[in-house]
Amino acid sequence: MPLLTQQIQDENDYSLVASLDNVRNLSTVLKAIHFREHATCFATKNGIKVTVENAKCVQANAFIQAGIFQEFTVQEESVTFRINLTVLLDCLSIFGSSPMPGTLTALRMCYQGYGYPLMLFLEEGGVVTVCKINTQEPEETLDFDFCSTNVVNKVILQSEGLREAFSELDMTSEVLQITMSPDKPYFRLSTFGNAGSSHLDYPKDSDLMESFHCNQTQVNRYKISLLKPSTKALVLSCKVSIRTDNRGFLSLQYMIRNEDGQICFVEYYCCPDEEVPESES
Amino acid sequence: MTSAVLKCCPVDVTVNRSLSTGKLHRVELLLQTKLAPGTLDVLLSKSFLCAPAVGVSNMIAKLAKICTLRISPDKLNFILSDKLASGGVSMWCELEQENFFSEFQMEGISAANNEIYLELTSENLSRALKTAQNARALKIKLTNKHYPCLTVSIELLSVSSSSRIVTHDIPVKVIPRRLWKDLQEPTVPDSDVSIYLPVLKTMKSVVEKMKNISNHLIIEANLNGELNLKIETELVCVTTHFKDLGNPPLASENASQARNPEQMAEVHIDIRKLLQFLAGQQANPTKAVCNIVNNKIVHFDLLHEDVSLQYFIPALS
């Protein structure tokens, strides 16, 4: 790729340089968190974390480890910028979202530092696309302070077990209620919509249940409009870990296997909607 | 000529029954009409191959909502006249009559002006011909059913020996003689750069994504076989570079020798027009050339097996 090397005169000028043989290993994971226009990117020597937030109540993080990239160098301790994720995804998939079999789009991504645009060089079959995306002032992201030591209940499910449930959620219900308990009903998803309530129970010995660690009965409600976007990650993932901490905060961790068999993680955090009135629990 | 009132003659059809079991589905086309002043008397009667006709009509339907069908003894043309934007014809699609029809008869307004111009909604035609994809026979005739129609009757294959016939009446407007001058074959502009197009599928997916970001696009090319598609917005600049495309020999050799091969000729165009053109291209053409007149117009010249297509996109002012 002579054009690519031509345009990158000096690698040391860049605070971030990353290259990928298959751009879909990046774009797929980013699509899983694409529910708002803008995202904040943090790069360290371990990889890139891309964060999207909504309504100060939900946060999605996509982690792309350095090992996913064929080349990954970060000159500073950490590099942070905000970017229009919609535009970034359009650029990454410029050669088509579903490429012809046998053709891969290669990517080289460079960022010179604060105030500079993010440069993308994409190549497929000798055709090169150069994108210069302006970056924005990074915004402070929420700290959910979700600590594994405070986790009360945790289940790991095969994603297929949740996929249908999530795609058919009764969106007329304002909330999704998640019940996790060491006793029956173990793990229950409930909605309260115009057409009535619906409850979906997963027995703890179900084949879909990879692991079940519930210490205490917890009933929490989450705004369904905030959780619905996580379906994007769910459909791509093979496993999902669902955890709640002592404050009722929800963590959904999706394990996504890319086309090369490598594992990436996407994580959603969500605040509980309200205290559940005693009479209903 | 006064507004065309059609008086229909009884149609004289000789159905082509020479069908053997051959794979090619022969189709009969019959077009008959008589204009009130007696100036137009048309009879086309010929068979053609369905599949390519369906392909052409689909392509036209993607390119233009309403188009003009020009019928002359040798050729059929689908024409899109874009009077508002460029003041001229923006699409000129040409089919050699004999590649599609095994029999063909027509009579135009006079021996000197042996042509018929019809305006129709291209989707109606493509929808009608879609039925004909696996047809045994197909007839097209110009009829008058309270208003002028292109009547497409399709004889479908059926498991039983009884045949089924589907008939579509496509309303058409017969275009009077005085408006023909706006519908003549456009002259190919004297281009600054002429270049072969890359694989249209790649180009289409690139332009599709660019359209999400910008309404305008810059297409530029040089005589060194390089073609670039560019968009520039406040947020992002995207350039796709195609190279080693090759340049067809220019008509005026002197002009090409004088030009620096590296120097780009460019046109700013409406990205939707380019995408519309690309979206209509299902099969890869045997030849595809892009001609650029710097800051004026870009002209696409495609040659499919039986169809040639010229498409013009004017520069944005």
Image: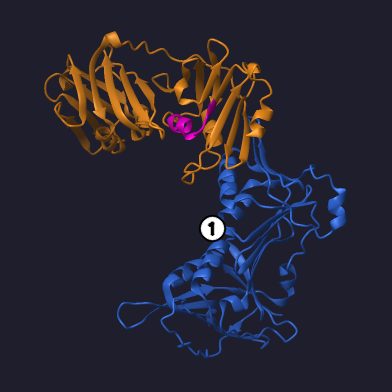
Q: Residue furthest front?
A: A2
Q: Position of residue B246 (x, y in %)?
A: 71, 51
- Asked whether, in this view, residue A57 is left or right of residue B114, the answer is left
The blue-tinted chain is B
Depth check: give the residue in front, A242 or B264: B264
Q: Which residues are magenta?
A: A19-31
Q: Position of residue B283 (x, y in %)?
A: 55, 59
Q: Residue furthest left?
A: A184
Q: Residue at x 38, y 13 (%)?
A: A144
Q: Residue at x 61, y 79 (%)?
A: B98
Above or below residue B179? Residue A278 is above
- Which chain letter matches label 1? B
Depth check: give the residue in front, A3 or A15: A3
Above or below residue A184? Residue A31 is below
Secondary structure mostly taken by the magenta-highlighted segment of the chain: helix
Q: Residue at x 22, y 29 (%)?
A: A189
Q: Residue A208 falls in which quadrant of the image?
A: top left
- Asked whether, in this view, residue A242 is left or right of residue B101, the answer is left
Residue A20 is covered by the magenta coloring: yes
| Viewport quadrant of the N terminus of chain B | bottom right
Q: Residue at x 71, y 60 (%)?
A: B83
Amino acid bearing label 1: Gln
Q: How is the image coloured?
A: by chain
Tell me the shade of chain A: orange
Residue A274 appears in view: yes
Q: Residue A228 falls in which quadrant of the image?
A: top left
Q: Position of residue B127 (x, y in %)?
A: 47, 67
Depth check: give the residue in front, B259 or B127: B259
